[in-house]
Amino acid sequence: MSVMLQVEGVSKNFGGLKALDHCTLNVEQGSITALIGPNGSGKTTLFNVITGFLPASEGRVLFDGHEVTGLPAYRIANLGLARTFQVSSLFPKLTVWENMLVAYPKQEGENLGFVFTSPGRIRAQEEEQIARARHILEQIGLAQKLEEQAANLGAPEARMLEIGRQLMFSPRLLLMDEPSSGVNPAMLDRLASMIADLNKKGLTFFIIGHNLSFIMKLSHYMHVLQYGKLIASGPPQTVARDERVIDAYLGVHR
Amino acid sequence: MSNFILFLAGVITLIGIYALVTLAVNMHYGYAGLMSFGVVGFLAIGAYTYAILTVGPPVGEDKYLVGFNLPWWVAFIAAGVVTTIFAFIIGLPTLRVEGDYLLIVTFAFAEVIQKLLSNEAWLTNGTRGFINIHQPLRDLIPGQNYQIFLAGMVVVIVAICYWIAQRVGVAPFGRTLRAMRDNELAALSTGKDVYRFKMQIFLLGAAMIGIAGAMYAWYMTIAMPSIFGMSVSFAAWISLVIGGTGNNKGAILGAIILLGAQQAVKFIQLTPALAPMISAIQLMIEGLVLVVILRYSPAGILPEQSPRPPRLPVIKVGKEEA
Amino acid sequence: MGCVLLLATVGFSLIRRIEGFLNIAHGQMLTVAAYCSYFLNATLGWNIIPAALVAVLFTAVFGYALAYIVLIPLKRTSPPLLIAIASTGASYIIHGLIELIFGPQVKQFRVPAMRAFKIGDLSLAAPDQVAMVVAAALAALFLHLLLTRTETGKAIRAMASDFDLARIRGINTPRLRIIVWLIASGLGGLAGVMIGLIGRLTPDMGWENIMLIMIVAILGGLGNVYGAMVAALFIGLATQLSVMVIPAQYSQVIAFVLIIVVLLFRPKGIFKEA
């Protein structure tokens, strides 16, 4: 199995604060890899650096062998590296179907010129994509709400829509920032099985998790961050028994 | 009776011009969330470009150096082009950063343009400005009917621009713009080159304002720095807020309402002593209206409902599946 | 002139920092204070100094009232950019009121004329101008001390960096917000009075200066109070100097060009957005 994502020696400084300290980790293709650590350990910062929302102070990031360090966020996304945000990744004033359709790649209709010169082609593409979107929406249970404004969705539905949108985007690697937050326990199982399903179909996941039981059941491999440093990596069972990890979490709770 | 029709034609022309500007502002803000307060700057550039290019060689007290004396349609197109160039220069640094910067810079831009126009007499004839600006096809259409013709022309042009704005809004381009406006980070992570989108809509809107500027020159037949003050930008914004942000029909509606009210005020001519007060009061009331509307009905009259999403794909697919 | 800008901009920056929007009506604080002083000074015959003090206090309260009656309620329903537009509306209202009450003609304070200090043949500055610089410096110093030494000041700075965190930590945010508005408006008012002292009063004062204020605020980094101070002095100096080289009307153009250039290279202004 090849490595989908390589993070090499990435550091990030904010003024005097070292948010990330020479992190080096890999995400295997086809896996569900987790990133855990106590609050403030730099998990989201790492995601931001990987996805191009923050420049790294040091180090490199390689996605499927290509160097993506320093590329603008949208370029990285277009290479197949998608992410969700801890706060909503949705577009509140757009309807559900619009949220979905924003996400498909290579939209002809986004070219201002084509809007006027090839309306037919655009319409064809749109129709194709909306069929696809409906299909996905049915799978995630949102088919009825096609024309509902995204802002009106309840929290679990919103999370589902986020996933639906990522599916439209069809990335190769999906970084999820605390997908379990705000989801009630009943939905958690559904969420977990969705992720597992998608993973079987070939989507690699890299997930920041705070809900440890959720994330441990789901993931194949884990990385643990504390104070911006990687302190442990390995399969969930091993990591859970690692002293340093226990210390890190308990230390915080003390 | 014909006097009234002439008056009406004039009002319609003015409304058309403002409507176009408001439409552009809607494209900037309603679609893309860009707030530019320099609307009047672009208008001035459009008007002056047209004037400079169509005016004849300097006469008498005129201080300007060159008169190009080009045909009206060349100048008309040029008005749009030159404005777009300016918009590009402004947009280059400001569209990359937070919206506040754009607001301040465009605000400053408008003021600076006004100053420049007053001072660069070699180009713009200073505070005197240009008079007797050449109107399109004036020679062909006799006397008073011209007013009606002009109104008609303006309406046609505005209609075309409205059509353009609608098409842009309905297309995936417009959708992505709104997405960008709602959640820029999410848009970026969906692979959208946000900067490019912003720039394109900014330029498009600016071009429309430039054209509106040329039409303004047609209507007023004069171009002086003093008419391009901040209150014009403000008027466009009020129109949009009243009519409904995000809705092109709303933009036009707002312009109609605002200008209608302004014109109506003209009829309330009280004693001459109050005349200078009127403009101050008018602005005051407009400010008040704006604040009140924002407070109680921020979306304006017509709902944000950005041009209604095409139902076509949905229905078609539905029919097929049924 | 730089000092005046400084006073005016610091307030503007603070508001931007704490409230998150650009308060264009801030420009009108200058006008309000100036005219209030005028009223007390020229019409009622007070001596200029107490008139100015009262005016500044009045403006502080006025700004606060404006904020709480008009602007802050808007925060619930409108995005910050729209609130900025609303503040423009408010500016028009204030401007209109002042013009109605006082008339559009230029006015002046009733102050004894003072002659400039002279060194040899060079006239440096009149005592009143020196007094102003001193006053501005004192105000800046006072502000600095307030922000760094007192509890209130530190609390304000905490609020500035992270509103919610400050609130959680038990800092009395509502009360502090009021204080911030009072200070900001008061400073703006002080600037207005000074402008009145240097020259003349017109109802357009607020509008004329708001652009410079905003430019200075950007250069200093939006919301960065100290940056604003430095930027203000810098711009003030630059415009005064450039007057010797370029015709005076261009001072604003210079500021504008400066800003475009700066933004091209350092999108967040010369200083960080703190």
Image: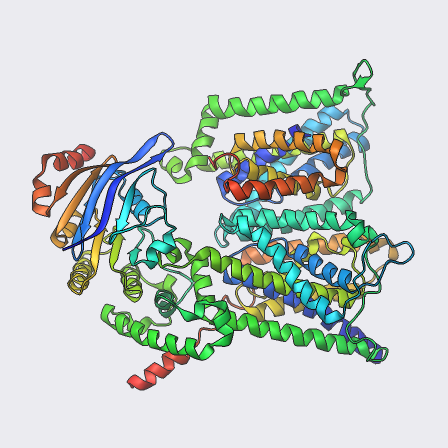
The residue nearer to you, when weighing A182 against A52, is A52
Residue C256 screen position, x and y as percent: 64, 43
Task: Tell me: C265 left or right of C96.
Answer: left
Residue C208 screen position, x and y as percent: 70, 42
Res. B257 visible in picture: no
Count of marks overlaid on the render: 0
Res. A13 visible in picture: yes
Q: Quadrant of the N terminus of chain C?
A: top right
Q: Quadrant of residue A231?
A: top left
Please report the residue visible at 79 percent of the width from the left and 56 percent of the height from the top. B224
Residue B139 screen position, x and y as percent: 83, 77
Task: Tell me: A246 left or right of A206.
Answer: left
- Residue B302, relative to residue A156: is it above or below? below
The residue nearer to you, when weighing B179 against A201, is A201
Q: Quadrant of residue A254?
A: top left
Please report the residue visible at 21 percent of the width from the left and 55 percent of the height from the top. A205
The residue nearer to you, when weighing C170 against B136, is B136
Task: Tell me: C270 left or right of B50.
Answer: left
Please report the residue visible at 78 percent of the width from the left and 35 percent of the height from the top. C200
Going by the picture, which residue comes out furthest to the top? C120
- Residue C234, relative to residue B57: is it above or below? above
